Structure formats: C-alpha cells, structure tokens
Amino acid sequence: MYGWEMLSFNIHDGFLEAIVRGNRSGLLTAADYNNLCQCENLDDIKMHLTATEYGPYLQNEPSPLHTTTIVEKCTLKLVDEYKHMLCQANEPLSTFLQYITYGHMIDNVVLIVTGTLHERDVNELLEKCHPLGMFDSIASLAVAQNMRELYRLVLVDTPLAPYFSECITSEDLDDMNIEIMRNTLYKAYLEDFYKFCQKLGGATAEIMCDLLSFEADRRAVNITINSIGTELTRDDRRKLYSNFGLLYPYGHEELAVCEDVDQVRGVMEKYPPYQAIFSRISYGESQMLDKAFYEEEVRRLCLSFEQQFHYAVFFAYIRLREQEIRNLMWISECVAQNQKNRVHDSVVFIF
C-alpha cells in the first residue's frame, strides 16, 4: 500500500488533515515564547495569550489569575480540537485518534489509585485528571483494594481492559506495585498501538513506528534510571521494557544490569540517534535528560508534517500541543514564583 495513499486518502481523511495542518500554524513560535518570558506577572501572560488562539479561552478569566487556570483553559482548547477531529473521523482514523488518549487514561487510573492510597479526596483527584483520559466509571476506582478488584469493578468495561491481563495480581496496591502497574500498562498499550500502526501500513506505519519506537526507548531509559537503588530486580526491570524500538533486544539486556546513570549513558552512546542526546548532557546532569528527550521528540514530531497522506500528523499535533501546555505551565510557575532566571531551563521551543 506504501506510496498509493494519495489515490484514496483525501476521500475520507483529506478534510481532517487540512484542519490539523491549519491548527499546527497556530502553535506558539519562538518569538511568542521570548515575549512570554519577559512577562512580569500572570496577567501579562494572559494579555499576550489573548492575541493567540488561546484568546477566546482566557479573555473572560478574572484577576488574580493562577497557573492552574491558564493550564486548564489551554488544555480545554486541545480537548475541543480533539473532539472536533474525532467527531469528523471515519475508520480507521477514529480508532487511531482513540489510541492517542489511552496513555492519559492510564495516567488518570494511576493518579486516582495513588491518591486514594494516600487518603486524598476523590473529587479533588478527579479535577486533576487529564480530560482526554476520562471515562464513565473512573470515580469508582477509589474502592479497589487490589489489582483484581481494580479490573473486575471498573476497568473491564474500558479500552484498557486488554492491557490489564499482564499485571493482575492479588497483591495489595502500594506505591511500588502501582508504579509497576503503570509501566506494565504502558508497555502493553505501546505494543498494541505499534501493531495497529503496522497494520495500517504505508507512510502512517513508517512514521508512527519511528515515533513509538522513540517513546518506547525513552521509557526504557526512564524506567532504568528510576529503578536504580530500588528493590526492583533485573528481571522485573526487563519485563517492563517494550518489545520493540531501537534498543530492543540487545540494548534492553544491557540496561537491565545498569547500576548507575553513567552506565546507562554508556549503553545509550552505542546508538547514534541517542548519542547526540547524551553528548549535550554533562556527567552528573541527569536532571537535564528529560528536556533533551523532549527536544528530540519535538524535532521528530515536526518532521512528520513534511510528508502527506498519513495519520501521524494527528498524533504529532496533539503531542506538540501538550508540549506547548507544559511550556506555558513552566513559564507561568516561574513568573508567579518570581524565578524568572530559571524560565528557560525547561522550555522546549517548537518552531
């Protein structure tokens, strides 16, 4: 099918591809970010954003503003755009768009279960959930005591049900088990999404498999670094790595036995695409790794717009919007806490 998409793609999906490419032109530019970084307070940020596509969502917000309000309204714009695309989509694009939200569903499940474990109010937790990952019975998660109950009472009727088969145990939910559950669910989700994209074929498979492979490799690195010094065994660590990606399988074998960040660096520098990422980070600066990975992800997402007649542009656009919202949250927090000297530390420029 590769190369023949142009014959039939526009019949069903041409309108939405035009919409998403038009939306992409509304992403904030480097000039916008430089202006935002000069703002003295949150009202200045609101005033600048009013001149962008976020204007209708922020213009009626009263002072004093809070960072959470800015992030909430910007996220609402993303959700509205996503729902518009989903309503207009035919198969298999509608299924592809639904796959994009499953990651947020997993994060919401983990947020509710962790919050309940620490005796937080359920309504307060629901407010913190990402709107793209909401489902009808999410509030019922609070009653589950172990993973079997979590599956039987709530998740059996959600799209996450197939992913739960690997992590159902009778063990009580504690912080360690919840984190293992999150990573096991993500592994199953990414592998399922990868297979779905392969089945679609053509340019969609080519670009999406590359993007998902990068995501799987990034998660493998994060799992390794976060599990150093914990009771997680090498075999347990290996089970959490996705069964695809540039690091699969030999890189996973090496990561599983790493005992410090410098050893992780030594493994990753054997792979040219990741050598460039780690070369920008000095030894002992592992906290800068997240930003370096985000920058590489943004570069790859922007490149997906260079080709036509594929679904990866929808995935790329939603991810770029999410990165933009993370940028706005960081800038707003720095301005609100009078830490403007740190404002460039975590901002990832998109264009």
Image (spheres, grey):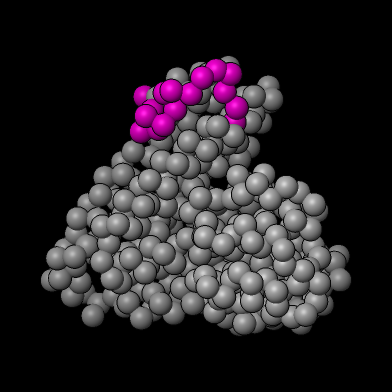
Quadrant in the picture for residue 169:
bottom right
At x 52%, y 60%, the residue is 136
Instruction: Give the magenta-colored segment's residue range.
Output: 51-67
Q: Residue 4 versus residue 126: which sits nearer the camera?
A: 126
Tell whether 203 sits left or right of 280: left
Which residue is rendered at x = 33% and y = 45% of the image?
A: 24
Q: Is residue 87 above or below residue 156?
A: above
Does residue 44 appear to the left or right of 124 in the view shown? Answer: left
Any part of residue 18 in sight: yes
- Image quarter hosting the C terminus: top left
In the rendered image, residue 239, in percent from the top left (x then y), is placed at: 69, 80
The image position of residue 78, as x and y in percent, is 42, 45
* Closer-to-camera residue (349/191): 191
Q: Quadrant of residue 228?
A: bottom right
Q: State whether residue 98 is above or below residue 21.
A: below
- How far across and how far down the image is residue 69, in percent? 55, 32
Q: Residue at x 42, y 52 (%)?
A: 318
Q: Is residue 119 above or below residue 69?
A: below
- 266 vs 248, left or right, is right
Residue 166: give x, y in percent of width and height. Answer: 64, 82
Of 50 and 132, which appears nearest the observer? Answer: 132
In depth, the one of 256 and 134 nearer the eye is 134
70, above or below 163, in the image = above
Specify whether residue 189 is in view: no
